[in-house]
Image (cartoon, helix red, strand yellow):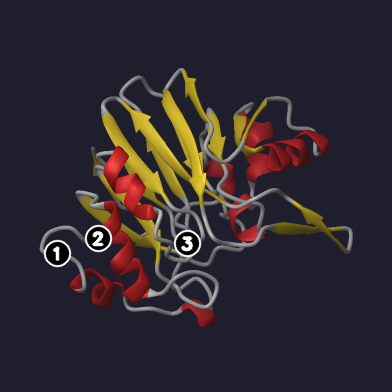
Amino acid sequence: MKITYHGHSVVSIVTETGCCIVIDPFFTGNTLADIPAEAVQADYILITHGHSDHIGDMVAIAKACEATVVGMVEVCHYAETQGVKKTHGMNIGGRFTFPFGRVKLVSALHSTGLEVAGQMVYMGEAAGLILEIEGKTIYHAGDTSYFRDMELIGEYFEVDLAFLPIGDNFTMGPAEAAVAAASIQAKKVVPIHYNTFPVIQQDPQQFVGMLEASVGEIMHPGETVTL
């Protein structure tokens, strides 16, 4: 499969069978995005939590591509109220097998909510995503601080590729993320959720330098890796 980073926390996956998956599709307003929302192809849209810089273009892309939105039940309910026809609600700890592979929602320490018509709407708990696709395991942590139970991810899953936030302020910073990477024991770790806004400016090379040799990999927006 081919995995592309699009800046902030946006990741897209194209499987060997041609299924297109997009995680946290924040393209419009994302100064680091390499493509506009209109260019995105998606069969499934996976959402870690209901903040605007993660839900982003979820509704527009889902409608344009007739994609299925997958995430917390509250996020899926919101998508349905906005006219999205296909959703699959889940919750923390749950796992489901889709045509492309299995998705499991795991804990993340973060708030979640979306301002709608001047009111803050509860969007369910924040989550991380564990994807088992074509014999490989991908962990997208979403927005989170470090928490000790990340060790359980490393214990129960052989993670081939992990996406961890390093921006600080809203999530864990580089030092905490390095501890998280050691807990998860992923073969490759890619930093995300940094440099999109002034308050989350970070040096990804500093983060990579905190990891074991050859584990850290910086992906620039538009870059693709094969797994």
User: Does residue 220 show up?
Assistant: no
Pair 1/3: label in front: 1
* Contact (Cβ within 8 Å) of mark 1 with mark 2: yes
| Above or below, comparing residue 110 to residue 186 in the picture | below
Q: Nearer the viewer, residue 57 or 174?
A: 174
* Residue matched to label 2: 182
From the top left corner, tell me how far across and down residue 225 is, in percent: 25, 45
Pair 2/3: label in front: 2
Q: What is the three-letter code of the residue carrying label 2?
A: Ala
CA–CA distance in space, label 2 to label 3: 22 Å
CA–CA distance in space, label 1 to label 2: 8 Å
Q: Residues within 10 Å of mark 2 (few under 14, many from 20)?
A: some
Q: Is residue 65 left or right of residue 215?
A: right
Residue shown at 14% from the left, 64% from the top: 212
Q: Is residue 29 left or right of residue 100?
A: right
| Residue 180 picture quarter | bottom left
Residue shown at 46% from the left, 32% from the top: 103
| Above or below, comparing residue 200 to residue 97 in the picture | below
From the top left corner, tell me how far across and down residue 175 is, in percent: 32, 76
User: Does residue 42 show up?
Assistant: yes
Q: Nearer the viewer, residue 37 or 46?
A: 46
Q: What is the three-letter code of the residue carrying label 3?
A: His
Of marks 1 and 3, which one's residue comes earlier in the chain?
3
Q: Secondary structure at mark 1?
A: loop
* Residue matched to label 3: 8
Q: Secondary structure at mark 3?
A: loop
* Residue matched to label 1: 212
Residue shown at 61% from the left, 60% from the top: 53
